Amino acid sequence: MAATASTDRAHRLMLVAVDGEFYRQVYADLSYDEVDPARHYDLTGWREGRDPAPWFSTQAYLDAHPDVAATDGNPFAHYLSRGWREGREIAASRLAAGYHALTEQQRAARRPARFSDAELAAARTGFDVRYYLAVNHDVAQSGADPLLHFLVHGWREGRDPSHDFSVADYLTLNPDVAASGVHPFLHYVLQGRAEGRETKVARDFREEALAQLKPFAERLADSRRWARPVELRTAADLIAALASAERRGLHLTFGQDDYSRSVGGSQLCVQRESAQFAAMGRNHLHVYPVNGWPTVRSGPTEAPMGVLLNGQALGAFVPAAIVEALKAARPPGPGSLAIHNMLGHSSRDVADIARAAGLNGGYFWLHDMGGLCAGIHLLRNDIESCGAPPQGSPACGVCVYGPARAAHVAEHRRLFERLDLIVAAPSQVALDAWRAGGDLDACGEVVLPHVRLSSPGEIVDAQPGPLRIAFPGTPTLHKGWPIFRHLAARFAADARYEFLHMASKPMAGALARHVPVTVTADDLLAMRRALLEHEVDVAMIWSLCLETFSFAAYEAASAGAAVLTGPDSGNVAAFAAQGHGLVLPDARTLEAWFESGEILQLARTARGARTYDMTYSSLTAELVEDQS
């Protein structure tokens, strides 16, 4: 039933998101007064190649995403319900330029009468200008009148006039309004409000996530469909590259992606590790699946693997070609191995490549809990911490990752049987969780934090003003973004607080001020500088899953901010409890603290906040150096 409800909601969103004025203006063959643009597009328009809005090209979306085209479903509905969450690219309508070039007189010739003074006055009583401009950056930048934009265009594009009014929900809750075809918001302010009509469904973000949840088999099918064809290179090409390497020895790593092009904490770890091995004069060979895969593979495979040698991309090779090349041209000198992630790899391929490099063992890093489950964050159905219950337990039976867990763990067990691996954990919390949730036979264990705090500085001065609460990093569900977004909307008008989102890109629908920040291997302190510059009092890192480390927590503490988190966040909670912040029992208590003002005790001045220096680990390079 969840899937049906989700589909129905997607369809309703699509119906209100069609830009009626655009549709009528650019398709002159349709009668302005007799055709309902949304229903016309839904029934026949998209099949005819028509575009629903100036910012969306139907044909371009279908061409760019053949898996969507194969479903024979409405592409606009797909994008609104799922595509934007998946980061799918869209293109503007080819008719957009002509539409925007129309003069007001030309549009008026086909446009119905404007809203009356009484309708505009009523609409202003329920329209939140600050909210509308905050969540619709394009409108804010255009200089358009926000109320008129919403009344004419916005409501059909799925935009809402305030945090407390949902256009889609109002139409769902009031089918008589939907059937009448009247403007839903005008109906509410002129009539529905006095009648006590509901304006928004009380919906927990977990319910929304469950409605979008895909069975694991579908995720595998998607990965197959999205896999891009690659041109495979031969063993001779890799032999030539290895033979020309000027450094001695070889450090071999396995990961889930190209660390030089992807942005993330584990990728930065591999970059630092690689840089230190370069300083040691050792070659670094990194192997990763060209096409992402949501679990491990099994047996000898022919999956195309990307290869980087000393940070330079060499192309894609099948595992057997990598084995052949290493046997023929392994650089002389010391060797070492680090497995940073097994997604997309098989234990057989990894062991064969390692042995071809003259290695029988190395380090297995706990950047996540991928050794315990295909759900690497240990989140049951992506919304609730599970703690890695016994395989085959009822808890696994109700989880989307349950069907894949046994094979996933078995492949990791074969990896540990084939190679002598030392488990390297970035925190004691990670190591304890790994021990408690599995029984893989490691030949050793070591804890090496990615960052250490040192040299506490002076007490940080802060300018008077509201408590500044920041969400540092990528706004994903498992990092607790929906909880932060809710607080930012709930207390948007509260003068006691200011909410900031610190990340490389802004997130639509958030009432938090975006501060552009991008952390790279060349600028590891970018987040710390931003936290200091904006005098952030509190860094909210409310991760739903067990964090094995958390750079954001250390960056926040080093900048004098208090870490605010919940009990399921793993090392974040442990770190905060060591005097670096506050651990609250649940999101309900969190909101109550904001309501009462208790959270104000985390202000910089109230805490006498201090800054710290940060020392970064070079991961496996540091462990290898310690042994030499």
Image (cartoon, helix red, strand yellow):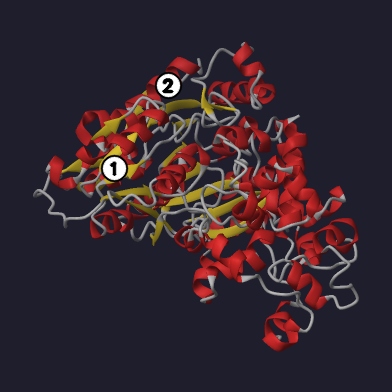
The relative height of residue 49 versus residue 458 in the rendered view (above or below) is below
Residue drawn at (30%, 34%) of the image: 627
Measuring from the top left, give residue 384's x and y in whole percent.
Answer: 52, 26
Q: In what element is the residue under mark 1?
A: helix
Look at the image and tell me whether residue 228 can be seen: no
Measuring from the top left, give residue 167's x and y in whole percent.
Answer: 64, 51
Identify residue for label 2.
433
The quadrant the C terminus occupies is top left
Residue drawn at (29%, 47%) of the image: 555
Measuring from the top left, give residue 163's x and y in whole percent.
Answer: 51, 50
Q: Identify residue type, mark 1.
A: Tyr
Between circles 2 and 1, the one closer to the viewer is: 1
**Disc sitting over residue 409 in the figure:** none
The relative height of residue 69 versus residue 428 in the rendered view (above or below) is below
Look at the image and tell me whether residue 422 can be seen: yes
Q: Residues within 10 Å of mark 2 (few under 14, many from 20)?
A: some
Identify residue for label 1.
554
Q: Identify residue type, mark 2.
A: Ala
Which quadrant of the figure has residue 43?
bottom right
Q: In what element is the residue under mark 2?
A: helix
Residue drawn at (84%, 62%) of the image: 36
Q: How far, Cα to Cα, is label 2 from label 1? A: 20 Å
| Nearest the eye: 294 or 303 | 294
Residue drawn at (17%, 55%) of the image: 464
Q: Residues within 10 Å of mark 1 (few under 14, many from 20)?
A: many
Between discs 2 and 1, the one toward the N terminus: 2
| Nearest the eye: 306 or 336 | 306
Side (left or right) of 509 relative to 576: right
